[in-house]
Image (cartoon, rainbow, N blue to C red):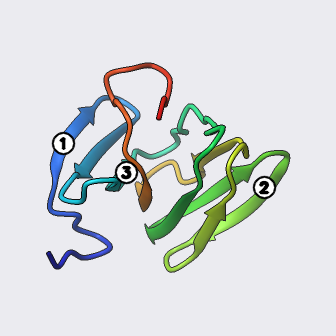
Amino acid sequence: MKVKLDDVDGDIVKDNDTYILTDNNYLNNLTYSRTFLKPGKKTNGHSHENEEEVYIFTEGYALMQIDTEYHHANKGDVFLIKAGEFHRVFNKHEKFPCAFTCIFQKYDRESDTAKY
């Protein structure tokens, strides 16, 4: 299956005042996901005890928190997140969205906690 960084060719799994999440679950073990983070919003942030994750920024400007470090995130930036590292994204723009694509081990999105 061929996909793009800015179009994961999946299903919308969450759509609220903060973001729109689209997941492609074509693979057996990995989810290819896109987050469209609305202006001035931030993700809740989380960590995964035993799983790593890749974030690829595709639109806008954001601030990426990994544990206690903060990094500017622009289109084309890629962040490699080790297991156990807390991570969160802040959309620093008040008028424009930001978007990023993630690759991670599949888990139950219905749960409040990412359990693998």
Quarter of the rendering occupied by the N terminus: bottom left
- Nearer the observer, 101 or 17: 101
**Left or right: 24 in relation to 113:** left
Q: In this rendering, is residue 60 above or below 91?
A: below
- C-alpha gap between disc 3 and disc 1: 10 Å
Q: Of callouts 2 and 1, which one flags the residue occurring earlier in the amino acid sequence?
A: 1
Rendered residue at 85%/46% (across/down): 68
The answer to whether residue 112 is visible is yes
The amino acid sitting under disc 3 is: Thr
Q: Of callouts 2 and 3, which one flags the residue occurring earlier in the amino acid sequence?
A: 3
Circle 1 sits in a helix, a strand or a loop, which is it?
strand
The dot on residue 70 is 2
The dot on residue 12 is 1
Q: Nearer the viewer, mark 2 or mark 1?
A: 1
Q: Give how far across and how far down residue 96 sits, in percent.
A: 42, 56
Q: How many marks?
A: 3
> Which residue has dot 3 on it?
35
- C-alpha gap between disc 2 and disc 1: 28 Å
Circle 2 sits in a helix, a strand or a loop, which is it?
strand
Q: Give how far across and how far down residue 73 sits, in percent.
A: 62, 67
In which quadrant of the rendered view does residue 30 lie?
bottom left
Rendered residue at 72%/43% (across/down): 84
- C-alpha gap between disc 2 and disc 3: 19 Å
